[in-house]
Amino acid sequence: MKKTIKKLAALLLAGALAATAALPAFADPTTYALSVNVAKDATTHTYKVYQIYTGTPDNGKLTDVQYGSSYPGGKTGAVPKTEIDAIFADANKPDFARSWAKANANSIGTEVATLNGTTTAYNAVPGWYLILDTNYVPTTDNPDDAYSAYMMVQVLDKDESLTPKRTKPSVDKQVQDETADAEAGATDGWGESADHEIGKTFQFKLIATLPADVDYSAYDTYPITFNDSMSDGVTFESIDSVKIGTTDVAASKYTCTAIAGQAGGAWTLSIADAKALGVDITSGTTITVIYNAHLNTSAIVSDESGNAVEVNNNKVSLTYNNNPDATGSGNTATTPEDYVWVFTYHVYNNKVDKNDKPVEGAGFTLYPDGSETAIPLYKVGTKYYKYDADKTDYPAGGSVVSEIVTTADGGNVFDIVGLDVGKYTLKETTVPEGYVQCDDIDIEISAVHTEANNKTSADLTLTTKNVNNKIVNLTGTTLPSTGGMGTTIFYVIGGILVLAAAIILISRRRVQQ
């Protein structure tokens, strides 16, 4: 009996040991943390994880490969060897995840996890996983962004963490000024602000910066569009150049909606595919548009220092393909707007007599400092705009004049509008009868302008001399100019008269003696 009990106990123990040895076969398989680095966009992007294949790790490879729970069409069971061989042959190709996902996107199953700022890792069994950037939510701090390309990763015997790669370009707008009076830090006159006279051609520059990214190959096309906006005081003239890097882009490669003579308003310059311009963009490059423009008579005039928001401000944004895995041109995003500012100035004048009454018939001519060539002006009412004969967008009903002539019906007040910084001389070239010619008026305009810290306005410090003039005419006889021949004649005649008077006085005294 004891022997029987011992045999039974031994059998039970052996069975227990056998059962214990068999336990690992029934335990949950080992899992590894599969994560996406979402630190920089935890609240703006959502990544979905799809289980494509599962298997058993064996010397750096998956064996016993099975279709995963997300495999398209709900397919299950063992994966044929031919398909396994194809996967391992293609897995290291840069576009493998994209090509596989595109081929199966319409039938892919349910995701096994969603990773974002709240859930950053998924406990994955060994296998192949597809990760899609499926949702982007713009925020105030991140108003534009791009989706990352499809990511395919194999989990074998360790944790796996992926960093999304996204192509997000930027845009900048600059305006050219004369180098002598450009803003501080400007290169060859190019900066965020400038000042110009009305009618004079100057240039704007639009710069799109494409970052280095080998994944440009993931895009079927990479279209970009410059969205430019001009204030009412700016007139578009023409496109000067379009370049990618240092290579000229032919006009047939882009579409521009701006029209010569267009005053203000929005327009676009679009490139259908930056990848098709004959330049490798994977190392990063720039696309630069330079166009010609000028200030017109609608330009806002600055006459005091301060913060300028709406003073001839001009801006640009960039629309780009932000989804490498979308078909065709894909989804788009638009960058924040970048601003520049253009200033112009004026000289206000009021012609009166000593009793502050208007004086008519006085003629004034404006000259550049040190020049005897009059500045032509375009008269509209009491405003005299700086005139350029090559421009045709001056208001109808005006007239070109070289001399400003005051009238009695309010025309004693005249405003010379649209001047650049510099020195000028205002001369009274026609003197009304019965008045004395006024002294020349030396005018000086100096300005320091720059983009404000908020990037949406500009700061202006204006230093002026004689830009707000009350010109008083005194009654009397107009004398010849000092230093002229007429003055010499007066001196000679005066001397003769004095000498004659002395002779007469001496003669009379002798007679009296």
Image (spheres, rainbow, N blue to C red):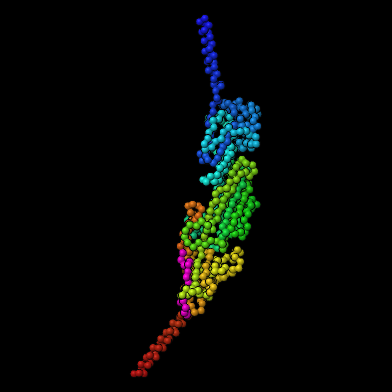
Locate residue 166: give its quadrant.
top right
Q: Is residue 15 above or below residue 278?
A: above
Q: Identify which residue is drawn at 57% across, 65% down.
A: 388
Q: Is residue 381 magenta?
A: no
Please provide percent x and percent y for residue 210: 56, 46
Instruction: Report whether residue 323 is seen.
Output: yes
Q: Nearer the viewer, residue 73 or 1?
A: 1
Q: Identify which residue is drawn at 54% across, 17% down.
A: 19
Q: Is 131 left or right of 452, judged from the image as shown?
A: right
Q: Nearer the viewer, residue 3 or 391?
A: 3
Q: Identify which residue is drawn at 60% across, 48% down.
A: 224
Please provide percent x and percent y for residue 152: 59, 34
Q: Identify which residue is drawn at 61% across, 30% down.
A: 69
Q: Is residue 465 magenta?
A: yes
Give the magenta range. Answer: 464-482
Q: Is residue 270 above or below residue 372?
A: above
